[in-house]
Image (cartoon, rainbow, N blue to C red):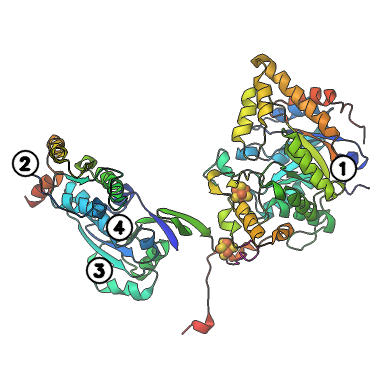
C-alpha cells in the first residue's frame, strides 16, 4: 500500500487559514489502513480545526467526507454536486488522490493533509517500512525476493557495500542491510552461487529518471 | 462509604479506557467542556491487556493537538487507579478541578459569545 | 606478466616489487598548497598517491583537480571515484578528463552514504555501483567504447583498482565478493585498514585457495593510530572497521604522550607481519591527516628506498 503520515496540524492550519468553507476529504484505501487519512483522522482534524478557528474568532464552516477512493473518477464524482459550496478542499488522500481531486475540480483549491511517504507494508502495528520504488523493471526474481533498489541505502545491484555490519546498514543500526537479507535468503534457497553473477548496469529509463510514466493497455481500453 | 467529589463533573462510563478515542476528547472540548480526564485502571492491570496504555497514548496525542490549536493540552489528562480505590477517585477529581480552575474556562466559550455578539 | 597501461604502479607490481601507496585527502578549500605540501612530504617514499573523492561525504576540493596538481609535480596519482555523486555521464566524462592529464590509476568505489557528511539533505545518485564502474573503465580502456556503444577517440589508459573490506559482514561472502570484482575486471585492490591480522590472514588464505591472488594485486591497507581515542573511535564508530580489543588496550596502556609513537609501532609491526602473508603484493598506508609520518613508517618497515622505475 501507499504509506502516508499526517502533516503537523500547525502546517495544515497555515495552509487553510484564509478560507471560510472547507471540505476535509478522507480516503478509504491505503491512508485508512496506515491511519493517516481515513474517516477517523478526518473527524479528529475537523474537530481540531473547528476549535482552532472558533478560538481565533473566525467563522469557518468545516464539513467532512470520506470517499471510497480518491484516485478514481467514479468516487470523486460523488462530491461534484456540492463541491462549489466550498472554497477549499483539504484532502487526506495520498499525493495521487490530492492531484486527482485537483484535476477534477479545477477551480477549487486543494491542499494535502498528509505527507505521502512510500510504498510499503506494516511490519507490525504502528511500524511501516518501504518495499518498492516502482522502478518499472522488477528484478526481485534475481535478488531472492528482496528489493535492493528500495531497501539498500545505496541502491546497490551488486552489494553489500563495505559498511554492512552485523546485518545492519551503515546508515542506521535500526535498518536491516538489504544485501544481508538477500544473502540470507539466497542461502535458504540454496542459490548462494548466484551471488557471484554480476548484475548488469540497470536501465533506469523505466524509473523516475525516464520522466513521468504511463501504462497504456490497448486490450483494456474502451 | 460515601465520598464527595466536585459536582461539576460529568461522568461518562466506558467498559475500558481503551474505548476512548482522541475524537471523544476533542468533541467534549469542542462542545464546551473545560477539561476532560480519563480515569483508567492501574497500568499493568488492564483486563484487556493494554487498553489503559492506549488511552494514555491517545490522551498524549490529544494534548499535542490542543496545544497546537491554542486550547491548552493540560485540559486533557489521564489518571490511573485501582478499581476499588474510591478515595483516590475523589482525590483526582479535586486535583483536576483545581487544575482547570487555575487555567480558567474553555476559551471557546468566550470566543463563541464574542462571535454571537 | 606485461603491463597494459603506462601506470608506474602497475609496472612496479608487475616487476614483482612490493608496492607502496598512500593517500591524501583534498582540503575543504581551494588552496593547492594543502595538497602539494602533503604530497611533497611523502613523494619519495611511495609509488603512487590516492586522492580521496569527498570522503565520508564531506564536500572537498575535487579528486580530479587534486590529481592534476600531483601530476604537475611529477607524482603519480590514483584517482578515487565514488558512484554516489555522479551518474554515468559524469563518471565517464571525469574519466576522460583524468585521461587527458594522463592519470593512469583509478580506484572504483561506492562511497559512504551522504548522511555521514556535510550535506545529509542532499540527493545521491548511485546510477551504477562500484562493480559496474570497474566494468565501465575496462570497457572504455580495452574496447575504446562508451557505455552507450560509441567509440572513444584516445581511450583512457588506466590501471583499475577497487577497495575490499575483509572485515565487513557477512564474512562468508567477502572472498566471493573479491572474485566478483575480479570478474568485473579489477586489477588491483587496496584493502580496508587492517587491525585484526588473524582475520585478514584467514581472508587472504581463502582468496589464495581460490587462486585469486594470482589474478589481482592486493595491497594491504594500514592506518596508524594517533591516540587511544582514535582507536576507540574507529572501533566503535566507523562502519565496517574491525579493531580488536587487544589493540585498543595496547594503545590505552601507554601514557598519552607516547601513544602516537605506539601507533606507529603497531603499524610497522603489522606491515612486517603482513609482508610474509601469501598474496600480499604491497601496502596502502593511509595516515589520516598525519602524512608526515609516512616516510618513517615506510623506512622502518624496510620498504625504502622505492624501486626506481621510469
Ligand atoms: S525491483 Fe523495482 S519493481 Fe521490483 S520491488 Fe524493487 S523497485 Fe519495485
Ligand atoms: S550496508 Fe547494506 S543496505 Fe546499507 S548501503 Fe551498504 S549494502 Fe546497502
Q: Position of residue C226 (x, y in %)?
A: 68, 23
Which disc number belongs to residue C10? 1
Write the residue at 16% across / 38% down. B88
**Eye-nearest disc, 3 or 1:** 1
Left/right placement of residue A122 relative to residue C80 reads left
Q: In the rendered image, is residue A97 in sight? A: yes
Q: Which residues are magenta?
A: A136-144
Mark 2 = which residue?
A: B2
Q: Is residue A130 above or below residue C19?
A: below
Mark 2 on the same chain as mark 3:
no
Write the residue at 72% across / 20% down. C262
Write the residue at 66% across / 24% down. C249
Q: Position of residue B72 (x, y in %)?
A: 22, 41
Mark 4 = which residue?
A: A41
Sort mark 4 into few (<14), some (14-19) or many (20+) by Cα contacts within 10 Å.
many
**Residue C125 painted magenta:** no
Q: Nearer the viewer, residue A27 or B94?
A: B94
Mark 3 = which residue?
A: A84
Q: Predominant secondary structure in magenta?
A: loop
For disc 2, the chain is B
For disc 1, the chain is C
Left/right placement of residue C29 relative to residue A56 reads right
Which disc number belongs to residue C276? none
Q: CA distance from mark 2 to mark 3?
A: 58 Å
Mark 3 on the same chain as mark 4:
yes
Q: Secondary structure at mark 3?
A: helix
Q: CA distance from mark 3 to mark 4?
A: 24 Å
Query: Does mark 2 have its CB less than 8 Å from ligand 2?
Result: no
Mark 1 on the same chain as mark 4:
no
Q: CA distance from mark 3 to mark 1?
A: 75 Å
**Eye-nearest disc, 4 or 2:** 2
Q: Secondary structure at mark 2?
A: loop
Amino acid at each position: 500500500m501507499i504509506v502516508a503520515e499526517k502533516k503537523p496540524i500547525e502546517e495544515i492550519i497555515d495552509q487553510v487559514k484564509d478560507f471560510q468553507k472547507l471540505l476535509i476529504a478522507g480516503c478509504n484505501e491505503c491512508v485508512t489502513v496506515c491511519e493517516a487519512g481515513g474517516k477517523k483522522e478526518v473527524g479528529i482534524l475537523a474537530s481540531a480545526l473547528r476549535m482552532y478557528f472558533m478560538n481565533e474568532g473566525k467563522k469557518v464552516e468545516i464539513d467532512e467526507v470520506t470517499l471510497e477512493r480518491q484516485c478514481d473518477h467514479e468516487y470523486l464524482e460523488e462530491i461534484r454536486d456540492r463541491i462549489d459550496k466550498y472554497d477549499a478542499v483539504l484532502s487526506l488522500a495520498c499525493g495521487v488522490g490530492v492531484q486527482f481531486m485537483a484535476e477534477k475540480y479545477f477551480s477549487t483549491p486543494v491542499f494535502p493533509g498528509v505527507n505521502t511517504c512510500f510504498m510499503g507494508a506494516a511490519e507490525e502495528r504502528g511500524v511501516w517500512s518501504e518495499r518498492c520504488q516502482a522502478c518499472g523493471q522488477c528484478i526481485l526474481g534475481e535478488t531472492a525476493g528482496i528489493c535492493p533498489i528500495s531497501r539498500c541505502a545505496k541502491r546497490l545491484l551488486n552489494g553489500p557495500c563495505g559498511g554492512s555490519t552485523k546485518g545492519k546498514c551503515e546508515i542506521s543500526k535500526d535498518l536491516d542491510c538489504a544485501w544481508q537479507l538477500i544473502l540470507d535468503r539466497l542461502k535458504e534457497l540454496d542459490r548462494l552461487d548466484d551471488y557471484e553473477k554480476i548484475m548488469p548496469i540497470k536501465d533506469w529509463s523505466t524509473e523516475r529518471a525516464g520522466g513521468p510514466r504511463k501504462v497504456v493497455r490497448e486490450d483494456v481500453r474502451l | 462509604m460515601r465520598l464527595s467529589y466536585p459536582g461539576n463533573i460529568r461522568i461518562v462510563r466506558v467498559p475500558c479506557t481503551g474505548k476512548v478515542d482522541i475524537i471523544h476528547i476533542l468533541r467534549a472540548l469542542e462542545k464546551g467542556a473545560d477539561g476532560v480526564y480519563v480515569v483508567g485502571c492501574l497500568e499493568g492491570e488492564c483486563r484487556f491487556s493494554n487498553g489503559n496504555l492506549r488511552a494514555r497514548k491517545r490522551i498524549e496525542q490529544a494534548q499535542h493537538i490542543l496545544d497546537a490549536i491554542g486550547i491548552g493540552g493540560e485540559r486533557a489528562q489521564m489518571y490511573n487507579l485501582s478499581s476499588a480505590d474510591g478515595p483516590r477517585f475523589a482525590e483526582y477529581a479535586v486535583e483536576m478541578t483545581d487544575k482547570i480552575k487555575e487555567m480558567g474556562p474553555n476559551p471557546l466559550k468566550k470566543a463563541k459569545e464574542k462571535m454571537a455578539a | 606478466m606485461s603491463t597494459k597501461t603506462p601506470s608506474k604502479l602497475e609496472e612496479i607490481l608487475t616487476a614483482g616489487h612490493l608496492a607502496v601507496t598512500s593517500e591524501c585527502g583534498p582540503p575543504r578549500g581551494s588552496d593547492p598548497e594543502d595538497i602539494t605540501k602533503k604530497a611533497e612530504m611523502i613523494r619519495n617514499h611511495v609509488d603512487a598517491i590516492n586522492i580521496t573523492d569527498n570522503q565520508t561525504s564531506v564536500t572537498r576540493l575535487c579528486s580530479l583537480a587534486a590529481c592534476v596538481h600531483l601530476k604537475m609535480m611529477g607524482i603519480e596519482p590514483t584517482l578515487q571515484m565514488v558512484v554516489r555523486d555522479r551518474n554515468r555521464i559524469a563518471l565517464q566524462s571525469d574519466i576522460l578528463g583524468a585521461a587527458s592529464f594522463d592519470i593512469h590509476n583509478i580506484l572504483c568505489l561506492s562511497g559512504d552514504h551522504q548522511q555521514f557528511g556535510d550535506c545529509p539533505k542532499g540527493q545521491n545518485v548511485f546510477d551504477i555501483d562500484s562493480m559496474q564502474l570497474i566494468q565501465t573503465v575496462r570497457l572504455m580502456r580495452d574496447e575504446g567504447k562508451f557505455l552507450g556503444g560509441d567509440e572513444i577517440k584516445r581511450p583512457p589508459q588506466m590501471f583499475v583498482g577497487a577497495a575490499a573490506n575483509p572485515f565487513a559482514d557477512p564474512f562468508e561472502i567477502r572472498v566471493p565478493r573479491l572474485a566478483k570484482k575480479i570478474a568485473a575486471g579489477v586489477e588491483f585492490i587496496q584493502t580496508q585498514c587492517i587491525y585484526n591480522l588473524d582475520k585478514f590472514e584467514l581472508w587472504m588464505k581463502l582468496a589464495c585457495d581460490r587462486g585469486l591472488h594470482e589474478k589481482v594485486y592486493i595491497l594491504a591497507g594500514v592506518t596508524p593510530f594517533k591516540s587511544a581515542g582514535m582507536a576507540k573511535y574507529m572501533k566503535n564508530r566507523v562502519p565496517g572497521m574491525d579493531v580488536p580489543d587487544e589493540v585498543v588496550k595496547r594503545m590505552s596502556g601507554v601514557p598519552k604522550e607516547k601513544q602516537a609513537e605506539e601507533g606507529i609501532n603497531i603499524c610497522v609491526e603489522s606491515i612486517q607481519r603482513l609482508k610474509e602473508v601469501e598474496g600480499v603484493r604491497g601496502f596502502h598506508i593511509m595516515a589520516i591527516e598525519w602524512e608526515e609520518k609516512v616516510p618513517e613508517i615506510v623506512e622502518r618497515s624496510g620498504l625504502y628506498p622505492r624501486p626506481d622505475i621510469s
